[in-house]
Image: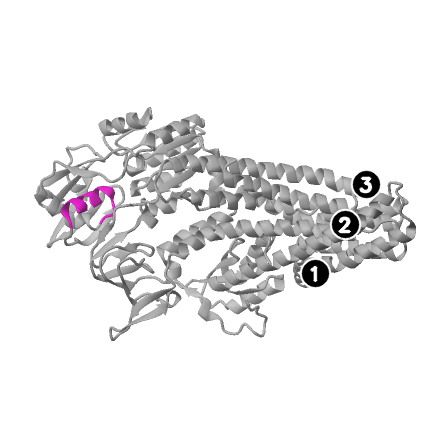
Amino acid sequence: MALTFDAASTGDMSAFLRRREDGRAGLDLLVTGARCAGCISKIEREMLRLPGVESARLNLSTGRLALGLTSAAVDPGHVIRALGSLGYPATPFDPGAALQQRDREGRQLILALAVAGFGAMNAMMFSVPIWAGLFDQELGPATRTVMMWMSGAIGAPCAVFAGMTFFKSAWRSLRAGRANMDVPISVGVILTLAISFSETFLNGRDAYFDAAVSLLFLLLIGRWLDHKLRSSARSAAGDLLALQASSVSLLDASGRERSVPLSEVRPGDVLRVRPGDRIPVDATLEAGDALLDNSLLTGESVPERVAPGALCRAGAVNTAGLLTLRARAASEDSALAAIARLIEAGAQSRSRYVRLADRAAALYVPVVHAAALATFAGGWAFGLEPREALIRAVAVLIVTCPCALGLAVPAVQIVASARLFRKGVLVKSGAALERLAEVDHVVFDKTGVLTEGRPALIHTPSSVIAMAAPLARASNHPMSRAVVRAAGDGPVAEAVVEHAGLGVEGVINGRRARLGRAAFVGVTTARPVETELWFGFEDGPKVRLRFSDTPRPDAARAVAALRERGLTVEILSGDQAGVVETVAKAVGICDWRAGLLPQDKAGAVDALTAAGRKVLMVGDGLNDAAALARAHAAIAPGSAIEASQNAADLVLTDDALMAVVEAIDVARSARRRALENFGFAALYNLVAAPAAMIGLVNPFVAALAMSGSSLVVTLNALRLRSGR
């Protein structure tokens, strides 16, 4: 069971800080009790007020609060105590503890839901005869009173048990001097039970035991559905992290091999990976014949030969012999963990719609309590009995809960992100989905995006290939990889430097050489062409390496589908005009530009934006990174270099271009679902609140209406899962 910390128990917790080279530090905490957009806003706002905290982001899906600290001297115990004072107990984040807590929360919700369902059905069994008596059916006063007592005997204990989820949350909030959305729910339930017992004891006309327990039953259905939605988003990241082995083989100083938990691996440790196993952490190859399957990370289906000294990323499969690796990062800092964090980030983000819901939710508690108080005071002043005025006030408290508003956007984002993950698209933020839904013009890079990105050498002498191979082995550019495939294994150049959009340079056998664009290598008479590379030593002759590349099988289908959706499509390429024109015709694109440098692509995107277009950029190379960053929305294939993936809003894991169409469809559908939820929540409150204030809605109807509104927005979000 997760522990909570108070002022006396936190002690020295500096070991949980993640120290950085610049003197700053990071701290990850597992926060319990946060359930809505208002909780996120409150926690992040209060954390940023603490001395030494420069950033705070709470992921509602995982419960992880990521804090950026100005110095490693900041006391984590002070941060945990501050969270406790807000009513949100916290512990240092541990994935195992987080999983146990989520499982425990799910079991508690199921148990409370079962009790509430039992109580609602059986309390209703005694309420139905009372309702029949209101329509001139035969039911004497004594019988009605017995029925009310029986309804209370069953409904009240069930309501108290099922309501503990809300009561505890409300009490923690009130102890901290604040009020969350569970406060009016708890007040409404308690007052409903109190009024019902009063009416029963005084032989009154109405009792609402069934209303209290039915309210909790429907609320708990919404909570459980929300819990399942968030679990589905977490499972995507969990499925990836599950690919990491729970234990690894570590070599100690004497060369002896022992098995240790993955969490204990630190940079510098020497590891051993057997054939068929995945690389556990990002590591440098020390010894062994490394042929790695990187399809999970890059989408590249052909195994990659890795030379000693090269980086082997976590998640890659060792398809060759026994490897000896030196760890470069801990498991939480690996490439696989980075992808999992992308998924977590996509599950809950600060999009425009979420910020709108935050502001509305922040107004809820003071407004609804003021409305309930005004209803009670106004009703009493205008001649209502205190009992009737109080019933109306309780109905206002119950019916106006903004649960539907709080779920409107997060539920949609979670379902949309999970659906796109299953389709091979990693969403880095919910705001990206909003921007993607607005695009009206799509810009494609050619090489590696519209084409296969695995060019093959043509008409190149083997002697030239052998000379260029040492530099090519140091680059991840598709044409460099083609040179490596043609040359086979061999040495790697020294002192290699890669220049964005130009090429690589390094030292081969003591001589400085360059591989890349013609002008970069020193050829001033040739035009820049993306289907060729030039190679030459600093003071030697320059030679050309030519390549061929073919369009992706689904490129033409994807372009046609984009046009069917009202989007215009264009190619921005650095290749020569003839090659670009050939590919454009093959895939059905009429507008294209050729011979562009990185700054030209970025300028073209800026010009389109200035003309009022909402541009989606799809690119994969260093020469696309600036354009990706400037576009309204950006997508990078999984085989793209890291800089392009960082600049993109979405990443394709399998490089299929139809995934771009799928992403746009889901983004547009998500926008519709979010706006529908907003519209429904606004209309519901505009109708329900006045109806409760004037007495048209009693607590039972209020319970049904409020809970039903939460279910409506959640079920509306779930429509995204099946694509309807």
- The residue located at (67%, 58%) in the rendering is 178
The answer to whether 264 is drawn above or below residue 65 in the figure is below
Q: Which residue is mark 2?
A: 124
Question: Nearer the N terminus, badge 3 or badge 1?
Answer: 1
Which amino acid lies under the numbered mark 3 shown in the image of this protein?
Ile
Q: Amino acid at mark 2?
A: Met
Asked whether residue 100 appears in the rendered view, the answer is: yes
Left or right: where 367 falls relative to 327: right
- First in sequence: mark 2 or mark 3? 2
Mark 3 secondary-structure assignment: loop
Instruction: Provide the residue span drawn in magenta.
Output: 475-488
Mark 2 neighbour class, 10 Å CA radius: few under 14, some 14 to 19, many 20 or more: many
Q: Are marks 2 and 1 in contact (CB under 8 Å)?
A: no
In this view, 689 is above or below 332: above
Q: Judge the density around disc 3: few (<14), some (14-19), many (≥20) Cα neighbours within 10 Å.
A: some
Frontmost residue, 387 versus 557: 557
- Label 2 or label 3, whichever lies nearer to me, is 2
Q: CA distance from mark 3 to mark 1?
A: 32 Å
| Residue occupying image coordinates x 91% and y 51% | 141
What residue is disc 1 on?
Answer: 161
Relative image position of residue 298 (x, y in whole percent): 32, 47
- Helix, strand or loop at label 2? It is helix
Q: Position of residue 361 (x, y in %)?
A: 64, 47
Q: What predominant SS class does the magenta segment belong to?
A: helix
Q: Quadrant of the N terminus?
A: bottom right
